[in-house]
Amino acid sequence: MLERSLQAARDIGYARVEAIVLCNLGMVESAGGDPRVARQHYEGALSISERLGDYLLHGQTLGYLGLLCSRQGAIAEGRGHLQRGEALLEATDDESSLAILHCNSAQSFAISGERDAAVSSLENATAIAQRMGEKVAFDLRIAIDQVKQILSSQSTNITNEH
């Protein structure tokens, strides 16, 4: 389905939709596919969003690429993407995207064992969600819950080791 959407966007020359679909394909591949393919999709979305000057989409995609890099062990590269994405998203009014990026940062910190930084990023995301109140998007709620589960399992592992 996404591949057809990608081809349709390309056929009609709608670059922003092409970038959105590429980002979504990257998320699908990141979740259970091939990380190399995910990276290609993210990089395609980044190239288009940068050319269009779409800071929102560019920041979102950097956040997802940053998490992918962190999961693949490229922590420094991942952090660079996350930091650039945060700077771009802070300049937009899309609080939900910024909060999701904070969740991605929290996961990156948790992956590298930096629990205090992970908790801080989670607190940033949670504070934004609380400000949003009823308008909190479902995907943000899921992202926050995922980070809480990761941190909880790490606490359990630390307790069991001692």
Image (cartoon, grey):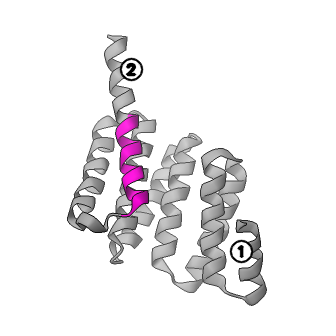
Q: Position of residue 30 (x, y in %)?
A: 62, 50
From the viewer's perspective, is the residue at label 1 or at label 2 nearer?
1
Magenta stretch encompasses residue 93: no
Question: Do the CB atoms of the residues marked 1 and 2 lie less than 8 Å apart?
Answer: no
Count of numbered tags: 2
The 10 Å Cα crowd at callout 1, few under 14, some 14 to 19, many 20 or more, is some
Q: Residue furthest bottom?
A: 12
Work out which quarter of the rendered image holds the N terminus and state it: bottom right
Who comes first in sequence, dot 1 or dot 2?
1
Give the quarter of the image for residue 86.
bottom left
Task: Give the residue at x 26% y 62%.
Answer: 128
Label 1 SS: helix
The 10 Å Cα crowd at callout 2, few under 14, some 14 to 19, many 20 or more, is few
State which region is magenta. Answer: 137-150
The vertical placement of 106 against 131, above or below, is above
Residue labelled with disc 2 = 157
Give the Cα separation between the discs numbered 1 and 2: 43 Å
Task: Give the residue at x 35% y 22%.
Answer: 156
In-image side of 4 versus 31 (left or right): right
Residue 150's label in the rendered image is none
Label 1 sits on what residue type?
Ser
Task: Give the residue at x 38% y 20%.
Answer: 157
Give the quarter of the image for residue 10.
bottom right
Q: Main secondary structure of the magenta part?
A: helix
Residue labelled with disc 1 = 5
In-image side of 146 versus 73 (left or right): left
